[in-house]
DNA sequence: ATATGTGAATTGATTCACAGCG
DNA sequence: CGCTGTGAATCAATTCACATAT
């Protein structure tokens, strides 16, 4: 299969959410036009994105909501549960542990880790807190697939290295820094402060940053 | 000036963070090679990104850390503070209100809004909670530039419409849905559940989703 | 009749090679 | 001589037009 643009993967996630809403509203059929409208992209784009993976519609009649939803869940790897751990039980880690309905999203919180001995052994937001020294053993024991990386930026790369060494192949990186992982592992950044700064750029507009020189 | 790719804006935010770290470490000069290494992009890319906005280096000698940092802050619109409000004081809104060192990031939390009368009038995480009915008055009074949109997905578009009508031009959208805003306003999505689903896609690998049909 | 699926055309972004300057 | 700055070339993604299937 051809290489898939990362933007396509992001849009597939959006289409899946729209289809889930439609199915909840008991809508049976939909079209690339409707999906495009909801996702704020072109209908061409919707069809092209889907075409990377197969042919899911009926010409003249559009798409079956339950069928397309099932196919997107399969494509995105959401037909089986994924085991998640939190690395770093500071404010953000604790807030994520408290996040409601985690299992509803096919992701199951199985453990958390912190280097602070005062936190180790406690049970925060429904999850056990382990020492970082136990990482290898607990990741193996609980089949952890994905970690939320919620340590300070200065500790993020080392924590990512330890997670990768322990066998965690997916990292959702909340730390405001770029981290690298080995071949075969994956990072998704989640950095709301970066989002804020991009907003500042767009809100400022072109007036304040006219090109200098030449 | 030529149109700037959104990916360039994201990278500029990364370069600025690296420069801030360098300045804290008292490093005086740097190069496109070092910035590229830290940001995990090519040195060509760094120079091209900067070239959209001007010439900031010295040939043969690289870049002055304080100068380039100052220029990036100017380009990104971070030479003046931005006033922020939180729309929706549920779990996530409250966690964001508690976020430490907000002002250090040039963003000042000025107000929050919620439709629950039990929350209105309280003071949560250092910020006053107002009724949504007061939105127009408080946005004008406190010069709110940017809102964190932390209401449920089903209420997100209507809340965004009200924010735009009140004069808020920037929205950091934490709700897992696509929202539209008027011309001249801007949205940055912050959706960690979408990030998780992208991870599931990459972790699954190509085996499980071979193209069907043809 | 109607809406999908897809090769071709276009547009956009990244990479490259080297000219330009200190 | 070294590293930046930048037009040209390559590569990738999006848009389009229409052939295709029901």
Image (cartoon, coloured by chain):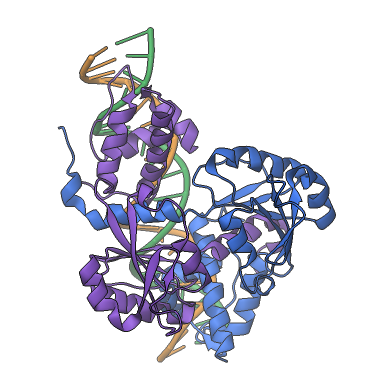
Chain colours: A purple, B blue, C green, D orange
Residue B182 visible somewhere in the drawing: no
Quarter of image, res C15: bottom left
Q: Please state if A92 lies on the left or on the right of B98 as rendered.
A: left
Q: Residue at x 36, y 78 (%)?
A: A159
Q: Point out residue B65 in the picture as x, y percentages from the top left corner.
A: 58, 83
Nearest the eye: B80 or B203? B203
Nearest the eye: B60 or A129? A129
Quarter of image, res A145: bottom left
Against A201, is A165 above or below?
Answer: below
Against B161, is A214 above or below?
Answer: below
Q: Point out residue A4 in the picture as x, y percentages from the top left corner.
A: 29, 49
Q: Point out residue A47 in the picture as x, y percentages from the top left corner.
A: 34, 33
Nearest the eye: B139 or A51? B139
Quarter of image, res B82: bottom right
The C terminus of chain B sits in image quarter: top left
Q: Residue at x 34, y 22 (%)?
A: A62
The N terminus of chain B sits in image quarter: bottom right
Q: Point out residue B133 in the picture as x, y percentages from the top left corner.
A: 77, 42
Q: Residue at x 38, y 45 (%)?
A: A13
Q: Please state if B162 lies on the left or on the right of B180 as rendered.
A: right
Residue A135 visible somewhere in the drawing: yes
């Amino acid at each position: 299969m051809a290489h898939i643009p990362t933007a396509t993967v992001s849009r597939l996630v959006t289409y899946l959410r729209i289809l889930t809403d439609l199915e909840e509203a008991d809508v049976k059929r939909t079209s690339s036009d409707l999906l495009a409208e909801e996702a704020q992209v072109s209908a061409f784009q919707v069809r092209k994105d889907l075409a990377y993976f197969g042919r899911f519609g009926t010409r003249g009649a559009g798409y079956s909501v339950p069928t397309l939803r099932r196919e997107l869940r399969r494509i995105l790897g959401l037909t089986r549960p994924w085991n998640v751990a939190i690395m770093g039980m500071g404010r953000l880690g604790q807030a994520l542990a408290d996040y409601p309905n985690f299992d509803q999203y096919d992701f199951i919180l199985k453990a958390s880790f912190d280097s602070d001995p005062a936190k180790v052994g406690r049970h925060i937001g429904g999850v056990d807190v382990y020492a970082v020294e136990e990482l290898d053993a607990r990741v193996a024991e609980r089949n952890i697939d994905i970690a939320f990386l919620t340590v300070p930026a200065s500790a993020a790369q080392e924590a990512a290295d330890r997670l990768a060494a322990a066998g965690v192949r997916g990292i959702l990186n909340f730390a405001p820094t770029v981290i690298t992982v080995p071949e075969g592992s994956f990072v998704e950044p989640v950095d709301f402060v970066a989002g804020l700064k991009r907003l500042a750029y767009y809100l400022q507009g072109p007036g304040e940053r006219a090109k200098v020189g030449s």
